């Protein structure tokens, strides 16, 4: 008998629930009964055909989950049935169960609610890997674009916990105030204020974490401090821009681009290990996911619509 589980899949251009066989664990894999799945902008792109999953990943969305280990492969060494975990996925989180390599799952941080933890892993891995790539350290100034988003809300908290000066941008006074409440020293409503001016009051930003892309390229270079690093992690407003190389050279600056989903397993496992080592001790006392709302799995399309509307602060979760 085939026991089936529910997952979301595109049907006529809309996310809908369908039945699928239960996943079974490979030798180094675990199967998780999902408690909550985070909704990310990458999921919106995938659902509209603009961000296909990497080879071998499930075809339905979902990059992070929390839940309870149900089964383990015969070479799994760390996790056991009944363990509460959070996990980073290449896809497939919009479901009742998922199978993944044990290296991409971490124990639920003590004191963190299992449901809220569904919005933690993708942002934690994104923030840690990009701060690591930029050489982030105490005493630096970081400018975080999209400060009210899922990655931004976590990045603000992590940067404050590291002892950095934090500037955050958001699209309204209300969202900017939320960034300030999370720990941003300066929160800029980019619709009415200049983040370049804000950065210059601190002598420029040593690191800029940018989800916007081409539309901000010129202003980002202007906002950088000498020796600063612009880290591009998203392309919400364009993928092609023009760099003034004179500015780049004059500031001895770096522009780097990073992704998470398409990395090989070894690199993802190293990032997950770094998150456990450096961020897990901060959760949930100094760093915690900000959850805007929850939806039943069958309402995944509504969650996507609400996230696309731009009024979400933090993360949305799907509950199987």
Image (tube, rainbow, N blue to C red):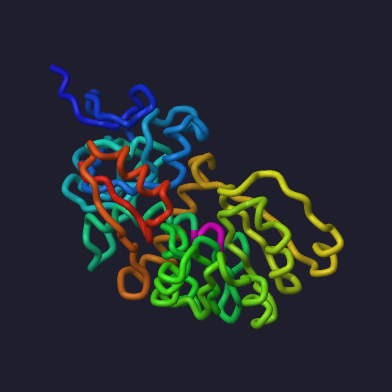
Q: Is residue 1 left or right of residue 168?
A: left
Image quarter where the C terminus lies is top left
- Along the viewing direction, whichever of 191 and 132 lies nearer the viewer: 191
Taking the spot 84% from the left edge, 58% from the top edge, the residue there is: 245
Q: Is residue 107 left or right of residue 267?
A: left
The answer to which quarter of the image holds residue 284 is bottom left
Is 128 within the magenta? Answer: yes
- Residue 15 horizontal/vertical position (percent): 33, 31
Please, which residue is most extreme toward the right here?
246
- Residue 174 horizontal/vertical position (percent): 41, 70
Taking the spot 32% from the left edge, 40% from the top edge, the residue there is: 93
- Residue 290 horizontal/vertical position (percent): 33, 63
Q: Is residue 54 left or right of residue 313?
A: right
Taking the spot 59% from the left edge, 58% from the top edge, the residue there is: 210
- Along the viewing direction, whichever of 55 and 214 lies nearer the viewer: 214
- Residue 110 horizontal/vertical position (percent): 24, 66
Image quarter where the N terminus lies is top left
Q: Is residue 29 visible?
A: no
Q: Which residues are magenta?
A: 127-131
Would you say the magenta stretch is mainly helix, strand or loop? helix
């Amino acid at each position: 008998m085939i026991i089936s589980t529910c997952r979301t899949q595109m049907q006529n251009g809309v996310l809908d629930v369908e039945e699928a066989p239960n996943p079974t664990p490979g030798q180094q894999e675990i199967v998780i009964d999902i408690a909550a799945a985070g909704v990310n902008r990458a999921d919106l792109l995938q659902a509209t055909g603009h961000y296909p999953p990497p080879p071998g990943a499930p075809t339905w969305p979902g990059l992070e989950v929390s839940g309870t280990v149900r089964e383990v492969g015969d070479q799994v060494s760390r996790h056991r049935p009944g363990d509460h975990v959070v996990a980073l996925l290449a896809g497939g989180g919009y479901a009742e169960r998922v199978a993944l390599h044990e290296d991409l799952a971490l124990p639920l941080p003590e004191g963190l609610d299992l449901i809220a933890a569904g919005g933690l892993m993708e942002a934690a891995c994104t923030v840690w890997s990009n701060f690591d790539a930029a050489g982030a350290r105490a005493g630096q100034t970081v400018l975080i674009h999209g400060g009210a988003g899922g990655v931004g809300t976590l990045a603000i908290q992590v940067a404050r916990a590291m002892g950095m000066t934090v500037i955050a941008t958001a699209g309204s006074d209300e969202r900017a105030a939320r960034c300030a409440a999370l720990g941003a020293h300066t929160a800029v409503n980019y619709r009415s204020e200049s983040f370049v001016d804000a950065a210059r009051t601190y002598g420029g930003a040593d690191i800029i974490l940018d989800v916007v892309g081409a539309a901000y390229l010129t202003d980002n270079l202007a906002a950088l401090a000498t020796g600063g690093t612009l880290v591009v992690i998203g392309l919400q407003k364009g993928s092609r821009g023009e760099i003034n190389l004179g500015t780049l050279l004059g500031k001895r600056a770096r522009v780097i681009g990073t992704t998470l989903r398409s990395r090989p397993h070894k690199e993802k496992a190293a990032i997950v290990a770094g998150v456990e080592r450096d961020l897990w001790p901060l959760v949930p006392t100094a760093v915690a996911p900000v959850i805007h709302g929850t939806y039943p799995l069958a309402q995944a399309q509504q969650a996507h619509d609400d996230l696309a509307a731009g009024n979400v602060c933090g993360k949305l979760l799907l509950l199987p």
